[in-house]
Image (spheres, rainbow, N blue to C red):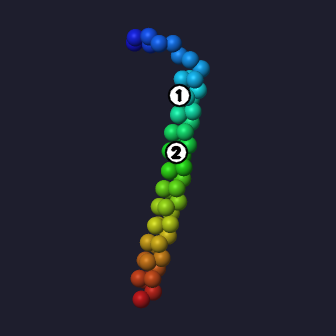
Amino acid sequence: MPLPTREITDKTLIGAILSVIFAYLLIRIFTTWYSRYLEKKEEELKEKENIGELY
């Protein structure tokens, strides 16, 4: 693996760490939102099945 030719400064290190944290937070927010969305859809399907059973 070749070594990087330019030196890593504090700004690039902080930028890399912040971008990783930002990407992690975006993924966490999306997965929690999507799981709640799926739970709502599942409840709607159960309600439709219950209505179908009543008639």
Identify whether 7 is placed above or below 34: above
Residue under label 1? 16
In the displayed structure, would residue 15 be above or below residue 53?
Answer: above
| Number of residues whose C-alpha sits closer than 10 Å to that of mark 2, classed few (under 14), some (14–19) or many (20 or more) | few
Q: Quadrant of the N terminus?
A: top left
Question: Which numbered tag is attached to residue 26?
Answer: 2
Residue 36: percent from left, percent from top: 53, 60
Relative to residue 47, is residue 9 drawn left or right?
right
Residue with the most extreme bottom position: 55
- 11 w.r.t. 23: above or below: above
The amino acid at mark 2 is Leu
Image location of residue 17, percent across then percent down:
56, 29
Q: Residue at x 52, y 45 (%)?
A: 26
Q: Quadrant of residue 54?
A: bottom left
Kindly identify the amino acid type of the residue bearing the numbered disc 1. Answer: Ala
Give the residue displayed 59% in from the left and 26% down from the top: 14
Residue 30 screen position, x and y as percent: 50, 50
Q: Are marks 2 and 1 in contact (CB under 8 Å)?
A: no
Res 50 label: none
Residue at 54% x, 23% y: name it: 12
Q: Quadrant of residue 4?
A: top left
Q: Is residue 52 above or below residue 2?
A: below
In this picture, residue 38 sits left or right of residue 21: left
